[in-house]
Image (tube, rainbow, N blue to C red):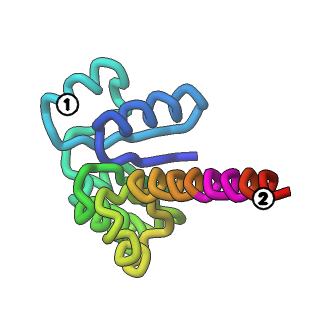
């Protein structure tokens, strides 16, 4: 499986490392030269310097044969554009976008991103589950004390 990752921050670094160790073919696109240079030291030819929203760069990175594009930059608009280009211009089967502002999740999905990931939303949902579990435990304890 061939995966293109856009964004070489911490998430991009660890995701690249994990995917490569699992035998995936990976290209990581990073536009900041200093970050690219650090990534290149470890990942060599699996890292490309450039903007993941650039059609020519995506083409040269093999987007036409990619099975998946994951855009995990810190900018929702860049993640949206990278996913849209991958899907519409190169026919990538599945796209995943990191969503930094949870309010943007719905719009990214409506504009064609297959899967959105919002760490804020995920953590909030876990907090809600914990609160609900805590309330349930309190209600059970109250019911037992009435018996």
Which range of residues does the magenta coloring cover? 132-139
Q: In this orientation, which residue lies closer to the viewer: 123 or 33?
A: 123
Q: Which residue is mark 1?
A: 35
Asked if 42 appears above or below 2 in the picture, the reply is: above
| Residue 129 figure quarter | bottom right
- Give the residue drawn at x 62%, y 57%: 135
Front-lying residue, 48 or 127: 127
Which numbered disc flags the more N-terminal residue, 1 or 2?
1
Q: Is residue 38 above or below residue 144?
A: above
| Image quadrant where residue 49 sits | top left
Mark 2 — residue?
143
Q: Main secondary structure of the magenta part?
A: helix
84 to the left or right of 33: right
Q: Which mark is residue 118?
A: none
Please identify, in this view, whether the residue under mark 1 or under mark 2 is nearer the observer: 2
Q: Is residue 14 above or below residue 134?
A: above
From mark 1 to mark 2, how far is it between C-alphas? 57 Å
């Amino acid at each position: 499986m061939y995966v293109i990752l856009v964004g070489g921050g911490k998430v991009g670094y660890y995701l690249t490392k994990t995917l490569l160790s699992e035998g995936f073919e990976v290209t990581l696109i990073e536009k900041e030269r200093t970050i690219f240079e650090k990534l290149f030291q470890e990942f060599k030819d699996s890292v490309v310097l450039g903007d993941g929203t650039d059609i020519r760069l995506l083409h040269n990175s093999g987007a036409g044969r990619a099975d998946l594009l994951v855009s995990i930059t810190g900018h929702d608009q860049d993640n949206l554009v990278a996913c849209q280009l991958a899907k519409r211009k190169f026919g990538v089967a599945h796209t995943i976008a990191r969503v930094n502002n949870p309010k943007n999740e719905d719009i990214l999905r409506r504009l064609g991103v297959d899967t959105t990931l919002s760490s804020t939303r995920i953590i909030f949902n876990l907090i809600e589950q914990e609160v609900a579990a805590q309330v349930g435990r309190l209600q059970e304890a109250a019911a037992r004390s009435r018996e």
